[in-house]
Amino acid sequence: MADSSKFIETIKAGYTFKGECFKMGGAMLDGAVVPGADVMIPLKMMNRHGLIAGATGTGKTKTLQMLAEGLSEASVPVLLLDIKGDLSGIAAAGTLNDKITDRCQKLNIEFKPTAYPADLLTLSNQKGARLRATVSEFGPVLLSKILGLNDTQGGFVAMIFKYCDDSKLPLLDLKDFIKVLQFVSDEGKPELEKTYGKISTTSTGTILRKVIELQQQGADVFFGEKSFEVDDLMRISADGKGMISIVRVTDLQDRPKLFSTFMLQLLAELYATCAEEGDMDKPKLVMFIDEAHLIFQEANDALLQQIETIIKLIRSKGIGIYFCTQNPMDVPAPVLAQLGLKVQHALRAFTAADRKVIKQTSENYPETVFYKTEDLITQLGTGEALVTVLNEKGIPSPLVHCMIRPPQSRMDILSDAEIDTLVSRSKIAAKYNEVIDNKSAYEILTDKLEEAAKREEKQQQQEAEEKAERKTPAKKEKGFFDDPTVKSMTRTAGNSIVRTLLGVLGLGGRSRSRKSLF
């Protein structure tokens, strides 16, 4: 048995902080909670990002929920990406039961059923405030990265954005971008080549196919107006608690490219919008990404590099990002290295490959004389985890086997009626659910092409008429003497006059045949 007094001394020294903090749970030794050895989390270091990992059913989601509650109590806004759809219960008060009572007694805490201020957000047509961004806001660089374009194709996308800016063609949704892409590769090609250089038909075809692929994953619902303002994620409720924004993305599990698109845009927008804050007493916003492997599942190298860069830099804006996933190896090593708070729930070893992963995982944590980490990872109970945080000097705290405190909100989902009520009371749902269809590149180019087609049709008709006139001989206009009756009368009168004149001259035909009487 380990020395409990030395253990308590180590835990108190490692988890006592000067600034504001909240209790995560109690330290455990030899399978039991040690009284007086509280595991605390310093709010000042919550912008250093974190990882919550563990097998299915080990309590990851409840740990996430408990951390979100602690932040909200400290007036820190929280953003939850709810992939499985089981985090909405944070908006309702929890219910006391025997298991919760037993755990609270062991941890020496009081259970206070609490409903936390929350808003439901959505990327699709589910209930909640709609999250959207325009193609222009996404920008040519991020769009090229999410489409996986090479340098040549990315340069062409940048040229399209430049042309749209110069020509006052707003790029609001994907149909705008597709319309411009089709225009510059056909009718508008001479105009663009004259100003911006040669256009490759191969590049336009490749880009169009990749955009259509993105559309097939449902990206049309994400691109458009009204654009979501990140300030609406950083609100404080009337009672001083941080608002908890729950993005319900349960329908994106089979559409990882759309999920990556949303995440990349959101991180980039947060980084671009928020000012540099330096060291703060507590974060401005903390984001929890459940089922984080979906971000990296189909991410190309350029996208991974972009995420890594933003993760490194965004903490200086006062924003913390926490990844929740089953296996720590789901998170790329460069990103994993940036995560200061680590909560490792149990992993199961069913195969040799599983044992290898567990061994690698145990090596990511600080060494300790109190536990054999590799073995303990497989023996952790539900709601228990190995924990290490960064202290106020940025040094990892001692690794501790922690019994996690239970959430005070409901550990279940809201009913449909409760969701309807929550959305109807939302201050931002009405703001973002209004359907807006401003005139943009699609309509402008369509009108332009229709006018050009009408002008061309009119010109062709005019040319055809002129050609027909040139082929047909000109007809003499009919006058008075062209009338058949007048012609007949004219001939009769003419003949009578001629005969009379000839008779007077003695040249009449009949007078020569007559015989003289004398």
Image (tube, rainbow, N blue to C red):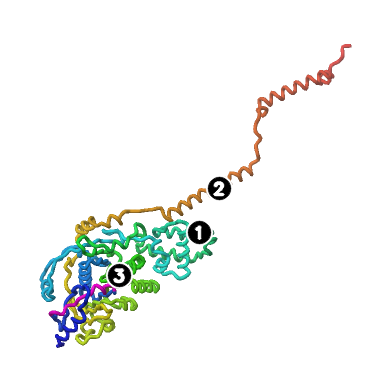
Q: Is the residue marked by circle 2 packed among few (<14), some (14-19), or many (20+) residues within 10 Å? A: few
Q: Is the residue marked by circle 1 packed among few (<14), some (14-19), or many (20+) residues within 10 Å? A: few
> Label 2: which residue?
459
For badge 2, the amino acid type reads Gln
Q: Mark 3, mark 2: which one is toward the viewer? A: 3
Q: Specify whether 135 is left or right of 375.
A: right
Q: Specify whether 187 is left or right of 278.
A: right
Task: Say which quarter of the image contains residue 91.
Answer: bottom left
Whether residue 444 is in magenta: the answer is: no
Can residue 121 be spotted in the picture?
yes
Between the residue at mark 1 and the residue at mark 2, the CA separation in whole angstroms equals 21 Å
Q: Nearer the viewer, residue 116 or 125?
A: 116
Q: Nearer the viewer, residue 3 or 465?
A: 3
> Label 3: which residue?
319
Task: Indicate the position of residue 335 as horizontal and vertical percent values.
Answer: 33, 76
Disc assigned to residue 186: 1
Task: Indicate the position of residue 216 as horizontal and vertical percent values.
Answer: 37, 63
Q: Magenta segment, which residues? A: 35-47
